[in-house]
Image: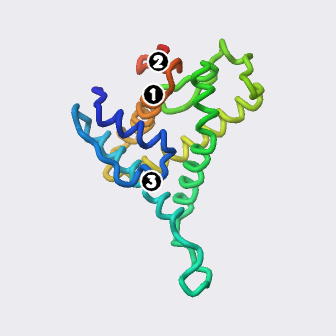
């Protein structure tokens, strides 16, 4: 699958901002080609960030000083918003873990603890803290991928299985230098 400049730019914008304020008004210059599925998933991912912005920017008090009821949201919308906020909160530590090679970006969108580095501790983080961060990140990523698959229009069953791979490409693009990345064939390389 050809990775395009647009995919890289969108990934960097979306993920580095933690899907917050920079999701609104994203401008892309398409240089390469994307598959229709990539375009659909990336568009849906952008809308998840826009939803987060809408909910986080709504005032709780109206002009007269009365409390306002928040906009209605489904359980899935609340879950993905919480997951995206948690990912942003943990982003710096996750980037450090990746840069140190303690974990790698798999080809299905998950973080994987590297066996060679499993006994290492990082400056300021114990092994247990690192493992907890990886588990939290994977749980949050699973929620985001499930929401992407559920809300991307007209996906076939085969395409639903590819959403994780597209999400993995986004994560690979924004991974820091030195991060371990899993290729589609299962082999690993250092960024």
Q: Is residue 102 left or right of residue 181?
A: right
Estimate how packed mark 2 is, as few (under 14), some (14 to 19) or many (20 or more) residues with alpha carbons within 10 Å.
Answer: few
Q: Residue at x 29, y 43 (%)?
A: 39
Earlier-in-chain disc, 3 versus 2:
3
According to the image, label 3 marks what residue? 48
Residue 94, located in which quarter of the rendered image? Answer: top right
| Circle nearer the viewer, 3 or 2 | 2
Q: Residue at x 41, y 50 (%)?
A: 23
According to the image, label 1 marks what residue? 172
According to the image, label 2 marks what residue? 191
Q: Residue furthest bottom?
A: 64
Marks 3/2: CA–CA distance: 28 Å
What secondary structure is found at the residue carrying circle 2?
loop
Image coordinates of residue 96 in percent, x first then y, are 61, 27
Marks 1/2: CA–CA distance: 9 Å
Earlier-in-chain disc, 1 versus 3:
3
Image coordinates of residue 69 in percent, x first then y, are 57, 77
What secondary structure is found at the residue carrying circle 3?
helix
- Disc 1 to disc 2: CB gap under 8 Å: yes
């Amino acid at each position: 699958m050809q990775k395009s400049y647009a995919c890289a730019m969108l990934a960097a914008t979306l993920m580095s901002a933690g899907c917050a304020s920079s999701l609104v008004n994203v401008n892309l210059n398409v240089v390469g080609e994307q598959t229709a599925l990539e375009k659909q998933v990336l568009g849906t991912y952008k809308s998840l960030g826009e939803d987060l912005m809408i909910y986080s920017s709504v005032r709780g008090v109206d002009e007269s000083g009365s409390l306002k009821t928040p906009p209605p949201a489904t359980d899935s919308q609340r879950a993905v918003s919480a997951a995206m906020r948690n990912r942003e909160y943990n982003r710096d530590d996750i980037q450090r873990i990746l840069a140190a090679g303690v974990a790698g970006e798999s080809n299905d969108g998950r973080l994987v603890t590297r066996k060679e580095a499993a006994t290492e501790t990082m400056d300021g983080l114990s092994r247990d803290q690192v493992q907890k961060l990886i588990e939290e990140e994977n749980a949050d990523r699973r929620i985001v991928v499930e929401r992407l698959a559920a809300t991307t229009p007209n996906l076939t069953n085969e395409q639903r299985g590819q959403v994780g791979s597209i999400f993995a490409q986004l994560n690979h693009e924004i991974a820091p230098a030195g991060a371990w990345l899993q290729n589609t064939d299962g082999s690993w390389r250092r960024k």
